[in-house]
């Protein structure tokens, strides 16, 4: 293939890709929306029973055993499917705040996001945090206000709260008619037509009625009690609100807003079409050395997630790799920037949650699974020869700590192996102290519960977990070797290493942290770090 033809192929394939995450506060309906998008995309034939925790079916995107048992999402899932001649890479993130680190990392790998708002509860705490992360990269946001099949707050109130709380301009694209038992459908403000839906159907009815025009007499015939309210609200919106502006959307300044009900398919397909029509194709990415365009021929990308035991029978570890440029083909040789070694990637895979298939090729925007035997870590860059490193994968100082020891001393090695692999995965932070003991650090208590469950189920280790007398952790950097030696000699009992071998100070109290910082003013104490470097001084 000539160079011009290769460039045209890359441009065409990049233009077909859409890579996005779904974000929300827990229980806003994120996993339900994910299932319905997959259903419309033809990727699955039956949506999981996501309403009941004890249902015989479970959500496709919730594939860990504990997710099926508890009815929650605790691990990010990747799902790729084709729709309308586009390749969709959908990343479902954990909703629970205890797994915010995993969500933050996933957001570094996407080009857009769908934000799900519970129409009864409005903007909630986790939504605020996630939008702040999106704003750091000016990620375009599509908003889906969910659960209008229930008695909820008025749509005007919700729009006002989104604008005031999240500081983002709202451009309503659809508008609900009624709510709860009187929910009749959504009116498309751009095409001036009402889409009438029937509840309780997994797919949109093939004989659905589409009513053109707000003044159509058919509306008065069907909805005599609600149509005047709809007309008044639409008139008000068109006078008072900003019209949808794709450029402002792509800049992260404006969010198009859809109303509906994920569980009943009200407005779901419109969100999918908006992603195809408005969301950006894969964008240029900033490496430390330069900006990388997606249509460049050499393949580059970065690892944003490690998942252990996706197939418990084979004890595998998969590195989730975002392709940033070029074309993957089986057998490609890539440079591993951290180690400087060359890797041959013969059998990368694409995903449908925990279902995988071999990938024949992939382009910028795609997410590949690479079999990992410990050589790849979160934040690693792979390139087709060039020395460059992608940045932006965050680690945060944990807030809770505990010690773990096996109930059966003969399983100490299994415990060490399990904790090491789960630490590399990012499910929890694992520190090794000067005595070689493992300490676990987490943002929230649920992380400890999940790790205990997975150690038991995947590594056959029952352990006892005890709170550790640690106030907080700080990553360290030193101005020179002499200061490093002096610090480690004096504070050896409070120094550990993280999974990447970085020194960490485990402060037993706020007072001790303050005293140590004053005693070593030239030492950096950092609350966050990025893969390969420390980010922020604490």
Image (tube, rainbow, N blue to C red):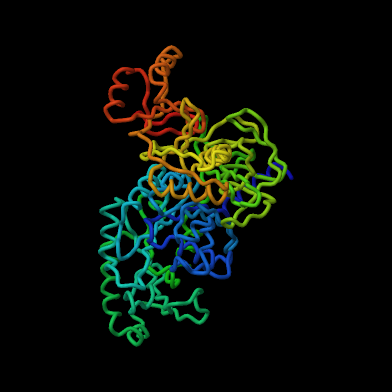
Q: Where is residue 222 drawn, in percent x and y?
A: 36, 85
**Farthest right residue?**
1
Check the picture and name the quadrant holding the N terminus. Answer: top right
Q: Residue at x 36, y 73 (%)?
A: 149
Q: Where is residue 477 drawn, in percent x and y?
A: 42, 23
In this rendering, the answer to whether 441 lies above or below 252 is: above
Q: Quadrant of residue 386?
A: top right
In this rendering, the answer to whether 281 lies above or below 517 is: below
Q: Quadrant of residue 233?
A: bottom left
Q: Where is residue 38 drawn, in percent x and y?
A: 53, 64
Q: Residue at x 29, y 67 (%)?
A: 155
Q: Is residue 249 left or right of residue 416?
A: left
Q: Quadrant of residue 297?
A: top right
In this rendering, the answer to whether 522 lies above or below 350 is: above
Tell me if residue 303 can be seen. Answer: no
Q: Is residue 26 left or right of residue 205?
A: left
Q: Residue at x 44, y 58 (%)?
A: 72
């Amino acid at each position: 293939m000539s160079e011009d033809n290769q460039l045209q192929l890359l441009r065409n394939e990049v233009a077909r890709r859409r890579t996005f995450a779904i974000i929300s506060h827990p229980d806003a309906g994120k996993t339900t929306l994910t299932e319905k998008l997959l259903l419309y995309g033809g990727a699955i034939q039956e949506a999981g029973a996501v309403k009941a925790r004890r249902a015989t079916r479970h959500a496709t995107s919730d594939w860990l055993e504990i997710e099926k048992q508890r009815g929650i999402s605790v691990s990010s899932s990747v799902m790729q499917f084709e729709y309308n001649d586009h390749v969709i890479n959908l990343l479902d993130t954990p909703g629970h705040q205890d797994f915010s680190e995993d969500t933050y990392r996933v957001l570094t790998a996407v080009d857009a996001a769908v934000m799900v708002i519970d129409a009864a509860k409005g903007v909630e705490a986790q939504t605020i945090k996630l939008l702040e992360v999106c704003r750091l990269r000016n990620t375009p946001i599509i908003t889906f206000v969910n659960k209008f099949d229930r008695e909820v707050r008025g749509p005007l109130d919700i729009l006002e709260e989104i604008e005031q709380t999240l500081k983002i301009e709202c451009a309503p694209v659809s508008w609900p008619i009624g709510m709860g038992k009187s929910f009749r459908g959504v009116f498309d403000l751009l095409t001036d037509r009402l889409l009438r839906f029937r509840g309780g159907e997994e797919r949109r009815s093939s004989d659905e009625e589409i009513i053109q025009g707000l003044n159509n007499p058919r509306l008065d015939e069907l909805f005599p009690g609600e149509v005047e309210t709809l007309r008044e609200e639409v008139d008000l919106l068109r006078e008072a609100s900003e019209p949808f502006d794709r450029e402002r959307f792509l800049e992260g300044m404006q969010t198009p807003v859809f109303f509906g009900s994920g569980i009943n398919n009200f407005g779901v397909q419109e969100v999918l079409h908006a992603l195809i029509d408005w969301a950006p194709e894969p964008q240029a990415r900033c490496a430390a050395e330069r900006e990388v365009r997606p249509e460049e021929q050499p393949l580059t990308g970065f690892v944003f997630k490690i998942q252990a035991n996706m197939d418990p029978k084979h004890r595998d570890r998969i590195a989730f790799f975002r392709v940033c440029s070029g074309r993957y083909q089986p057998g490609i040789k890539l440079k591993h920037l951290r180690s400087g070694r060359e890797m041959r990637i013969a059998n990368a895979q694409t995903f449908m949650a925990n279902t995988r298939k071999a990938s024949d090729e992939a382009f910028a925007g795609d997410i590949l699974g690479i079999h990992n035997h410990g050589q790849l870590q979160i934040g690693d860059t792979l390139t087709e020869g060039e020395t460059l490193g992608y940045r932006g994968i965050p680690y945060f100082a944990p807030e809770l700590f505990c010690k773990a020891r096996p109930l059966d001393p003969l399983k100490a090695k299994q415990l060490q192996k399990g904790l090491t692999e789960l630490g590399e995965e990012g499910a929890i932070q694992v520190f090794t102290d000067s005595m070689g003991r493992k300490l676990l650090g987490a943002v929230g208590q649920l992380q400890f519960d999940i790790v205990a469950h997975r150690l038991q189920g995947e590594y056959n280790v029952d352990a006892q977990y005890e709170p550790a007398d640690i106030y907080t952790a700080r990553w360290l950097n030193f101005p020179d070797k002499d200061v490093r030696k002096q610090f480690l000699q004096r504070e050896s009992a409070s120094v550990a290493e993280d999974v990447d071998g970085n020194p960490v100070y485990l402060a037993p109290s706020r007072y001790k942290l303050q005293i140590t910082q004053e005693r070593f003013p030239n030492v950096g104490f950092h609350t966050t770090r990025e893969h390969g470097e420390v980010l922020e001084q604490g």
